[in-house]
């Protein structure tokens, strides 16, 4: 069976904009449930300014406490060299920088214009790699920006090229506000795959308009096998108005497995992680398959009860 690489981002993208402050212990409960379900790669936190994102203020406390660090690939997002230093001290081996494809989105997100952000991302990558860490880069708002509208494909390809040139092992193309549709996803990824190779690319999707699964499939048709997903569809960027939840892990796992791909994730155990996600955030789940999965649970329970009564 062909493998799909799933990078779980609920602990970072999913929790960063939650209105209810989530404690470090609760984050670890969520991460442990994800690990138990078979998730092999997790973006655990971000080393950003605690003033900008209060939910991630505990990054240095959380990272050294992560379960099974030898087996699980944990990563963390860093916006600058200050974040890189903090990450390095906390034991991070794999980090990600975020470069938005437009001037305004960079200003809102990291308080730099596009040229400065490009340079800072490149120098942060080089500095991290120099200390033996592995670095990857997000190219955010790669299809549309909430402030500047549609983003030109050439610009995304160019920024992707620059991040590879700076040493990124992987570039994650991100539909930060969930504005892309399958044809645009297929077209951009077709060019990117031809230029850079599918194994070095992955896709980060939001489900704002309900297109995330269709977009994932369009990318899979172009050979993309790496995806960021978030359990329960938790997610949203505090600096990108209109960004709703991420592509839900359970949605992609269910579709991929039904289409003959191996994700390594046990959907029944993922149900427990979904329950933890709901209980620690108090938020209702955003994934599209949650309702069906609940109905399946009820059906199975009924079968078990019937058998016990026989
Ligand atoms: N971690 C912790 N603190 C940091 C930091 C980091 N990575 N980078 C800067 N700071 C601190 C500085 O020490 C300074 O603290 P002080 O006010 O106590 O002196 C303060 O933050 C401002 O620093 P400055 O360099 O002027 O940054 P800024 O105000 O221009 O903000 C960022 C720039 C990048 C630090 C901030 O915008 C940020 O963290 N953005 C992340 C946004 C995000 O996570 N988005 C979602 C994911 S894409
Ligand atoms: Zn996101």
Image (cartoon, rainbow, N blue to C red):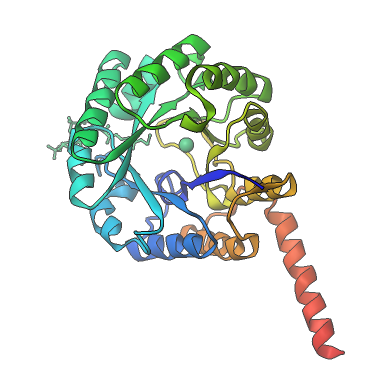
Percent across and percent down for residue 157 are: 46, 15
Question: Which of the pair 262/205 is nearer the observer?
Answer: 262
Q: Is residue 274 left or right of residue 299?
A: left
Q: Residue at x 63, y 26 (%)?
A: 222
Percent across and percent down for residue 184 are: 63, 19
Q: Is residue 296 left or right of residue 20?
A: right
Q: Residue at x 79, y 82 (%)?
A: 305
Percent across and percent down for residue 192 are: 52, 19
Q: Residue at x 62, y 52 (%)?
A: 250
Percent across and percent down for residue 50 are: 25, 44
In the rendered image, is residue 111 in sight? no
Q: Residue at x 64, y 22 (%)?
A: 186
Q: How many marks?
A: 0
Question: Which of the pair 68/96 is nearer the observer?
Answer: 68
In the rendered image, is residue 206 in sight? yes
Q: Is residue 282 left or right of residue 87?
A: right
Question: In the picture shown, does residue 85 fall above or below 195?
Answer: below
Quarter occupied by the C terminus? bottom right
Q: Is residue 155 left or right of residue 248?
A: left
- Residue 100, located in which quarter of the rendered image? top left
Residue most extreme to the front: 1
């Amino acid at each position: 069976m062909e493998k799909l690489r799933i990078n779980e981002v609920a602990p970072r993208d999913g929790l960063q904009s939650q209105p209810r402050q989530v404690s470090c212990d609760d984050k670890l409960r969520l991460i442990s449930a994800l690990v138990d379900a078979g998730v092999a790669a997790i973006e655990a936190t971000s080393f950003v300014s605690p003033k900008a994102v209060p939910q991630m203020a505990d990054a240095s406390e959380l990272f050294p406490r992560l379960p099974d660090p030898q087996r699980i690939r944990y990563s963390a997002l860093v916006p600058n060299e200050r974040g890189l230093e903090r990450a390095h001290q906390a034991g991070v081996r794999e980090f990600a920088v975020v470069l938005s494809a437009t001037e305004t989105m960079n200003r809102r997100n990291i308080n730099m214009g596009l040229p400065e952000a490009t340079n800072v991302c490149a120098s942060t990558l080089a500095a991290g790699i120099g200390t033996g860490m592995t670095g990857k880069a997000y190219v955010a708002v790669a299809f549309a920006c909430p402030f500047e509208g549609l983003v030109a494909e050439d610009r995304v390809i160019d920024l992707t090229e620059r991040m590879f040139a700076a040493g990124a092992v992987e570039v994650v193309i991100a539909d930060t506000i969930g504005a892309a549709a399958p044809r645009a996803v297929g077209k951009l990824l077709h060019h990117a795959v031809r230029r850079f190779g599918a194994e070095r690319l992955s896709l980060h999707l939001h489900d704002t308009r309900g297109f995330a699964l269709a977009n994932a499939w369009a990318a899979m048709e172009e050979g993309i096998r790496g995806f960021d997903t978030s359990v329960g569809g938790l997610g949203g960027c505090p600096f990108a108005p209109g960004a709703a939840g991420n592509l839900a892990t359970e949605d992609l796992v269910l579709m991929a497995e039904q289409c003959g791909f191996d994700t390594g994730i046990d959907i029944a155990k993922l149900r427990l992680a979904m329950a933890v996600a709901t209980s620690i955030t108090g938020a209702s789940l955003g994934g599209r398959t949650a309702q069906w999965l609940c109905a399946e649970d009820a059906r199975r329970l009924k079968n078990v009860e019937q058998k016990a009564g026989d």
